[in-house]
Image (spheres, rainbow, N blue to C red):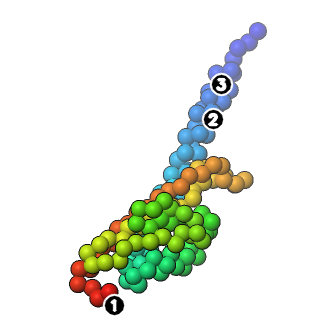
Amino acid sequence: MRDQGHAGVELAMAAGLLLIPVALVVMSLGPWSESRVDAEALASEAARAAVLDLNVAAGTGQVMAALTTLDLAAEGIRIGWCGTEPQPLATAPGTCGFSRGSVVSVTVQVWTPLIATPWGAVGGLWVAGEHTEPMDLYRSLG
């Protein structure tokens, strides 16, 4: 009986079983990071628009307008205003106190697949970005 050649086959199988999961995780880091940057940018734009117009609807509208630029679906976005739990865009009116010296805080969550494969996404998680925008002390509110 000859036992030659088994070591090469075992090495190939072991390397494949160890390297495939590592490669999938490494390939997933890019989309996770991109979603985090998108969530932070959306939160910043929403807070600024809400402070300028004194209305959270303006901030939500800013997020809706930015979705096409970022190539995101509205179903994959949740937004929360001033400490409220983030809700889908269609059902998240939110409320904030717009008074001199106050702050408007926004949390935006973006749905990100855990592992993106050519056959579709596997699992997923919400990646959050937060931003707080101060109201000017000397701003006219009328």
Which mark is drawn over residue 92?
none
**Quadrant of the image containing the C terminus:** bottom left
89 above or below 26?
below
Which quadrant of the view contains residue 5? top right
7 above or below 53?
above
- Residue tagged by mark 1? 142
**Quadrant of the image containing the N terminus:** top right
Identity of the residue furthest to the bottom in this view: 142
Which mark is drawn over residue 10?
3
Q: Which residue is more in the foreground, 71 or 8?
A: 71
Residue at disc 2, secondary structure: helix
Residue 127 spot, x, y in % from top left: 50, 56
- Left or right of 1? Residue 51 is left
Q: Residues within 10 Å of mark 1 (few under 14, many from 20)?
A: few
Residue at disc 1, secondary structure: loop
Q: Which residue is more in the foreground, 114 or 131?
A: 131
Q: Residues within 10 Å of mark 3 (few under 14, many from 20)?
A: few
Label 3 near label 2: C-beta < 8 Å? no
The residues tagged by marks 3 and 1 sit, at their Cα atoms, a distance apart of 76 Å
Q: Which residue is more in the foreground, 82 or 6?
A: 82
What residue lies at 40% left-to-right and 66% top-to-bottom? 82
Residue 125 spot, x, y in % from top left: 56, 52
Which quadrant of the view contains residue 37? bottom left
- Residue tagged by mark 2? 16
10 above or below 116?
above
